[in-house]
Amino acid sequence: MDTQLLLLRGINVGGRNRVPMADLRALLASLGCEDVSTYVQSGNVVCRAAGPPEVLAGRLGAAITAELGLTVPVVGRTAAEWAATVAANPLCDLDDDPTRLHVTFLAGLPDPERVDALVAEAGALAPEVVAVSGRDVYLHLPSGYHRAKLNQAFLERRLGQVATARNWRTVLALADLAGVGT
């Protein structure tokens, strides 16, 4: 069993898609996961599980639909992938406020032509900055995420991938919870 991180998109935000963390932990235990921990109420999970995180993410999404009647996209990463995401952030030098730095985690690898088009288009959105590395989209959003043009919906449309975003403070907290702290 390996340490895995699962990110649920759009739960417990604005009163929508309510998923109590105790129910989420119980669902993961029923899927054979061990040492299940959640961080805050917005669908951040660290657990130990067998198999690829993408498979577990799909199984968890199906279980949430079956048990709770909600359709919730789930993105998964291994602890090693998470550590690599933290270490590779090319935008850390732009701001020391972790609420202005974000990572959008993609469910799959985007087409390189879509990435090139996104990066070209994002140049006109300054002072917002984007950098794409594999399945991770790093963002510097000086006016905050809620005012950002480079938001999740924009990135999903441009890259053709399911995505969910976390601010840098949450990314680092999950790294610590997964034992791959910075």
Image (tube, rainbow, N blue to C red):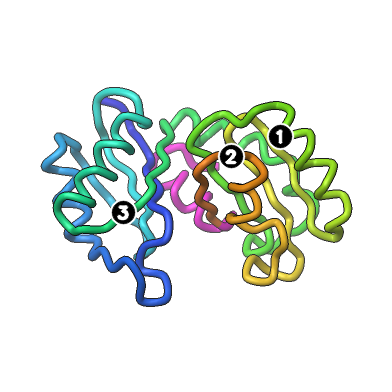
Task: Please state which amino acid type lies under the numbered disc 2.
Answer: Gly
In the image shown, does 100 or 122 lie closer to the viewer?
122
**Residue 152 placement: quadrant:** bottom right
Measured Cα–Cα span from mark 2 to mark 1: 8 Å
Camera-side residue: 142 or 123?
123
- Which label's residue is closer to the chain start, 3 or 2? 3
- 115 vs 31, nearest the viewer: 115
Residue lying furthest left in this view?
30
Comparing 62 with 177, the one in front is 62
Q: Is residue 172 magenta?
A: yes
For the C terminus, the quadrant is: top right
- The quadrant in which residue 84 appears is top right
Residue 71: give its label. 3
Q: Which mark is residue 169?
A: none
Q: Secondary structure at mark 1?
A: helix
Along the polypeptide, which appears first: circle 1 or circle 3? 3
Mark 3 falls on what kind of element? loop
Q: On the rendered structure, is 126 left or right of 71? A: right
Point out residue 29 in the picture as x, y percentages from the top left corner. 14, 43
Q: Are marks 3 and 2 in contact (CB under 8 Å)?
A: no
As drawn, the label of residue 114 is 1
Q: Range of the magenta residues? A: 167-182
Q: Secondary structure at mark 2?
A: loop
Mark 1 vs 3: CB contact within 8 A: no
The spot of residue 12 in percent (x, y) is 35, 68
> Which residue is identified by label 2?
160
Left or right: where 101 falls relative to 173: right
